[in-house]
Amino acid sequence: MKTKLPQPNSPDLDRSKKLQQKISQEMLANEGLLSFERYMELCLYAEDLGYYTSEQAIFGEQGDFVTSPERSALFARAFAAHLQSLPTRFDELHIIEIGAGSGIFAAQLLKQLANSGVPVKQYLIVEKSAALRLRQQAFLNAEVPDQRSLVQWVDSIADPVTNAVVIANEVIDALPVRLLTIKNRQVQERCVQLDSERQFCFTDISAEQSLVATVYAILENSPVLSAKRAYHTEICLRLTGFVQQIASLVQQGIFFFIDYGYPRSEYYLAQRSMGTLLCHYKNTAHDNPLIWPGLQDISSNVDFTALAHAGIRAGLELNSYGTQAHFLLASNILASIEKEASEKELLHTSQQLKHLMLPSEMGERFQVMTFTKNMTLEHDQFTTRDLSHRL
């Protein structure tokens, strides 16, 4: 993927060079190598210098990528409709959002729930980035001043909430991943080192046995394990622990994970021989994670089969799995829009819905997986077409 990228300004380049020095120092202290997982972690989360911890613009048209809430308030409206239909035990909603981005989804959802007459008891945002927390607070102060007192920010939750709805929108794709090179049933780990000009480059090393065993278990029936040509892909070893941590937040509740990805049978297709790693800079997608550390987003598609297994291991029950389009349709958002909107509003709304629902846009690329804990819901409550059989 050869893409011409906008050039960073001098202050951003200076910050990136500081992070590059930090990464290089850790690399040299580790025999000149870093796993890509650690490299990605530093690029995204290094204190004050990482992509999510610095003060640069990230979200929206002025940032690097556009999420569904940034695209349209209809996403939050659909969520509000789903939450409005929950059992009576959720008469007063406790909502926990994992990683609230710019804060726009929280503001939109609180507005929609207030308009629908659904009382919210508390809105907890679990956010470890101090820079993002400040932006979220400023945004919510301006957008929902009357409901601002409902919102609290925490690094983590010490005591589980009794009843809650947990939402993680575009969070898992930012978990650091290991990179792999597979050829003739041999598994190598792709790491990062410095070349002769002290620039970051990839190098393959023999994978540790535990990693090899994990890869063999995942790809047991896949032809890519015996690929004659090098097959590059990734694996998120942190997923299980991450989901276990989220599952422990509540005693009883519903969990929504929204992200882009595939079920495993589609994730490790032979034709996907370069993996799913993706970078975004100034709303331009490309595939080089080794340039400008700290200035660009680095993400990996989600293996939703792995997510389902992680949820079940964490004591959750898989409720449904479907596309974002099916999730929106199940909220009856189309019927409510047609009933309430004027002809002019319908035209504008239809354009927004296309971005959220069309297969060529976000409709199929984004998937919604729901779990429950210590409660039972209808399996078709959050989707018009459950695709769990594809997992």
Image (cartoon, helix red, strand yellow):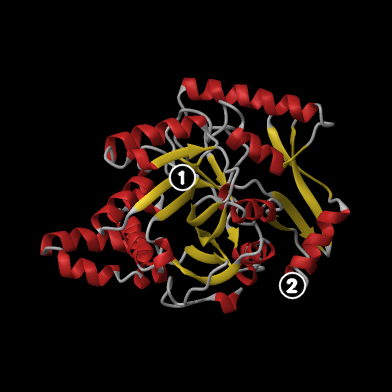
How far from the left and from the top, in percent, is residue 190? 75, 47
How far from the left and from the top, in percent, is residue 56? 45, 30
Mark number displayed over residue 124:
1
- The answer to whether residue 80 of the structure is visible from this angle is yes
How far from the left and from the top, in percent, is residue 346? 17, 63
Residue at position x 53%, y 34% in the image: 129
SS type, badge 2: helix
Residue at position x 78%, y 61% in the image: 215
Q: Mark 2 points at which residue?
A: 223
Q: Which of marks 2 and 1 is nearer the N terminus?
A: 1
Outermost residue toward the left in this view: 343
Q: What residue type is labelled 2?
A: Pro
Front in this rendered view, residue 242 or 229: 242
Q: Which amino acid does label 1 sit on?
A: Leu
Q: Is residue 71 left or right of residue 208?
A: left
Residue at position x 47%, y 29% in the image: 8
- The answer to whether residue 102 of the structure is visible from this angle is no
Q: Is residue 260 left or right of residue 334?
A: right
Q: Are marks 2 and 1 in contact (CB under 8 Å)?
A: no
Residue at position x 43%, y 74% in the image: 381
